[in-house]
């Protein structure tokens, strides 16, 4: 299982249920990287999907303890259930948000991290992998600048 996330300089990832700054280059990278894969998201992140609908061209899995059915999603009531389901997929990404990243990180051995080089007010963070000795930066996949904000798409791997 792998993770995909966009972080600001302080590893903030969201505020008030959404991403305060979302770069179109990152959205494109997300679409291309996750195309055809299984994607696992928390119920709050699903609320931030366009129209609350499943992402097209992917197998959408929702983590929730409160909803039994969400149209277009396979519902899982625990991280263990989601991890078991992920075994049936050739490729599976954890796509957020904060609570789901934290709980699913131990199941993952690669993380696609877009570093958006700015700082904005956040109420949700991703664990700082630069300070985690069990992870290392393996590869810089892309870099660029959009609207005056520089960004890098980085691949971290578990040591
Ligand atoms: N920067 C990025 O790349 C990125 C990507 C995705 C999201 N985000 C941001 O992350 C924020 C949302 O994160 P969040 O932590 O507030 O919410 P979240 O992780 O998206 O969803 C939390 C919900 O997921 C369900 N859940 C969590 N753990 C579970 C478990 N072990 N078993 C079953 N269900 C479980 C619960 O749903 P129920 O309450 O229904 O039980 C919980 O309320 C937003 O600001 C969003 O924009 C950022």
Image (tube, rainbow, N blue to C red):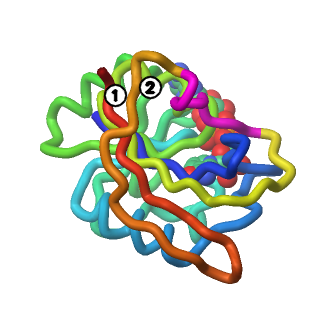
Q: Is mark 2 within 8 Å of ligand 1?
A: no
Q: Is 113 on the left-hand or right-hand side of 142?
A: right
Q: Residues within 10 Å of mark 1 (few under 14, many from 20)?
A: some
* Structural distance between the alpha carbons of marks 1 and 2: 5 Å
SS for callout 2:
helix
Does 64 sit above or below residue 34?
above
Q: Position of residue 25 (x, y in %)?
A: 49, 75
Residue located at (79% from left, 54% from top): 119
Q: Nearer the viewer, residue 85 or 112?
A: 112
Q: Are marks 1 and 2 in contact (CB under 8 Å)?
A: yes
133 in the magenta segment? no
Left or right for 79, reference 42:
left
The residue pinned by badge 2 equals: 105
Tell me what residue is drawn at x 39 percent, y 57 percent: 72
Q: Quadrant of the C terminus?
A: top left
Most distant residue in the bottom direction = 147
- Say which quadrant the N terminus sits in: top left
Q: Which residues are magenta?
A: 124-131
x and y percentages locating residue 134 in the rendered image: 40, 17
Q: Which mark is residue 108?
A: 1
**Rendering coords of residue 12 (x, y %):** 71, 44
- As helix, strand or loop, the secondary structure at mark 1 comes to loop
Quarter-of-image position of residue 37: bottom left
Q: Nearer the viewer, residue 39 or 28?
A: 28
User: Ligand 1 is located in which of the four quadrants?
Assistant: top right
In the drawing, what numbered circle is on residue 59?
Answer: none
The one nearer the camera, 141 or 41, is: 141
x and y percent of residue 101 in the render?
52, 33
The residue depicted at 37 percent of the width and 17 percent of the height is 80
The structure residue drawn at horizontal position 62% and vertical position 59%, both measured from the top left corner, is: 116
């Amino acid at each position: 299982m792998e993770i995909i996330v966009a972080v600001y300089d302080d590893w903030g990832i969201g505020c008030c249920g959404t991403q305060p700054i979302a770069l179109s280059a990152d959205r494109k990278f997300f679409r291309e990287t996750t195309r055809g894969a299984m994607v696992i998201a928390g119920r709050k992140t699903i609320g931030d999907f366009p129209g609350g609908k499943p992402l097209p061209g992917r197998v959408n899995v929702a983590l929730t303890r409160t909803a039994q059915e969400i149209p277009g999603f396979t519902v899982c009531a625990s991280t263990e259930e989601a991890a078991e389901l992920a075994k049936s997929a050739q490729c599976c990404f954890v796509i957020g948000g904060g609570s789901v990243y934290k709980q699913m990180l131990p199941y993952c051995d690669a993380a696609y991290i877009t570093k958006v080089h700015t700082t904005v007010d956040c109420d949700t963070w991703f664990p700082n992998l630069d300070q985690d000795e069990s992870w290392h930066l393996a590869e810089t996949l892309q870099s660029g600048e959009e609207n005056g904000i520089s960004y890098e798409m980085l691949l971290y791997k578990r040591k």
